[in-house]
Image: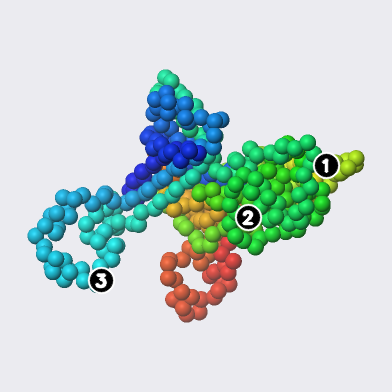
Amino acid sequence: MTVSSIVYAAAARFPDGETLPLQVIDGRVTVDDSWAPYVQAEVVIPRPDPATYARLDPEDALIRVHVRAVQSYGDPVPVSLLSSLWSDVRLAGLTARYGDDVTVAGLTAEVARPYNDEGIRPSARQSFMLTLRARHLSAAEGKVTLTLAGDEARAMDYGLVDSSPEMTGTTSVRGAVRLVLERIGAPLAPGTADAAIEDIDAATWEPGMSGWDWVSPLVEAANMRLWADFQGLWHLDPLDDLYRPGANQLVEFVQVEDEVARDDDYYDAVVVVYRWTSGDTDKVAYDTASNGTGTKTLTIERDTPWPGSGAARGILDRMKAQRITLETVANLAQLPRTTVRVPAPDLPEYVGHVRSVAWEFGTDRSVITTRNLTKLHSAAWLLEPAGQRWNDLPTGSAWTADYNPGGTE
């Protein structure tokens, strides 16, 4: 089992520019591709003094909390070790010793103290800039739990305050997204993903409707995803472009849960019902999708103008009956939307995508949930050793007899 160490740190950043370091004693950060906000977290700190506690008030102002995590695979280099190595070596000796071939990796391998027999692995880091959503004091335990969320929460908070609907005049999904983000002062990453708004009623922003509730049906119908990354930069991407290439093999399992169920979130047909009023006329429209003859239907009703077809298919494509939840040694490099192989003990081997990752501060564990699982064929190329080539097989081997070109069954 790989041994590593993760150090978590946090600091509150107030609108007036003050930064307040926070002593982290426990917590959890969850990144989930099926959630909005994409990032949600809890950070537990010791009960602060009354003045600090009063400042950590989510109702008072927009307070950011910067959460940082650093994972290392060896002890820091102590000064005493460097002294023992170099105290009696002259500068000319150091030059001759390292010359032009010195690398950071080489120095690390020489002076660091690895936790693992294979040596020092590169450190991994993650940094999250989140907003403070709630504060809970447990006086008996002397702890305060801060509930945090990604930037989508700001768009969910902001609603149109007006006495009449706003005829935005926008004709594209990207234009609608940009309008909402301008209202909350948030940046949108450059990109070309876009779609036309098919019904002029869908471009009307009703009073009291949040920016998120107005724009998200437009995004969904266009088969795109609107999300804010760890640093609060917003992205509008086609759903197909969100999955990162490559296959990562999960190892070092602590616990595996395999579930197939028709209850909960399994459906093979989806109907989205849109209801709205245009002028004095009540309107209704339906968007549907199914895998053949549907046997279990999910019906979603939305009080918003028809944004165009596509939402039902996107929802259905994200639903699978089988999901595997893995508890592993914490790994900061594992993220949602990566392709993953799941060689779980006593289970068929699957390939799919990571849906969510939760890093548990107190246990140094990751809880990973997968989606879109497909069982690997016993002779799939993905199961071959690294570097395996077709020419390495015995003469006379047949592709159709020995290997499944698709790699799945």
Amino acid, disc 2: Leu
Of labels 1 and 3, earlier in sequence is: 3
Q: To which residue does mark 2 refer?
A: 236
The secondary structure type at the circle numbered 3 is helix
Amino acid, disc 3: Asp
Q: Position of residue 406 (x, y in %)?
A: 59, 66
The secondary structure type at the circle numbered 1 is strand
Q: Is residue 274 left or right of residue 13?
A: right
Q: How many marks?
A: 3
Please report the residue visible at 53 percent of the width from the left and 65 percent of the height from the top: 380
Of labels 2 and 3, earlier in sequence is: 3
Q: Which mark is residue 300?
A: none
Does residue 349 lie above or below 139 as drawn?
A: below
Query: Which of the two residues, 167 or 73, is positioned nearer the viewer here?
Result: 167
The secondary structure type at the circle numbered 2 is strand
Quadrant in the picture for the C terminus: bottom right
Q: Which mark is residue 276?
A: 1
Query: Which of the two residues, 91 or 26, is positioned nearer the viewer here?
Result: 91
Q: Is residue 190 left or right of residue 48?
A: right
Q: To which residue does mark 3 refer?
A: 101
Q: Residue furthest bottom?
A: 395
Amino acid, disc 1: Trp
Please report the residue visible at 54 percent of the width from the left and 69 percent of the height from the top: 403
Q: Residue furthest right?
A: 280
Does residue 392 lie above or below 166 as drawn?
A: below
Q: Separation of disc 2 and disc 3 at Cα?
A: 44 Å
Query: Which of the two residues, 115 or 274, is positioned nearer the viewer here?
Result: 274
Of labels 1 and 2, earlier in sequence is: 2
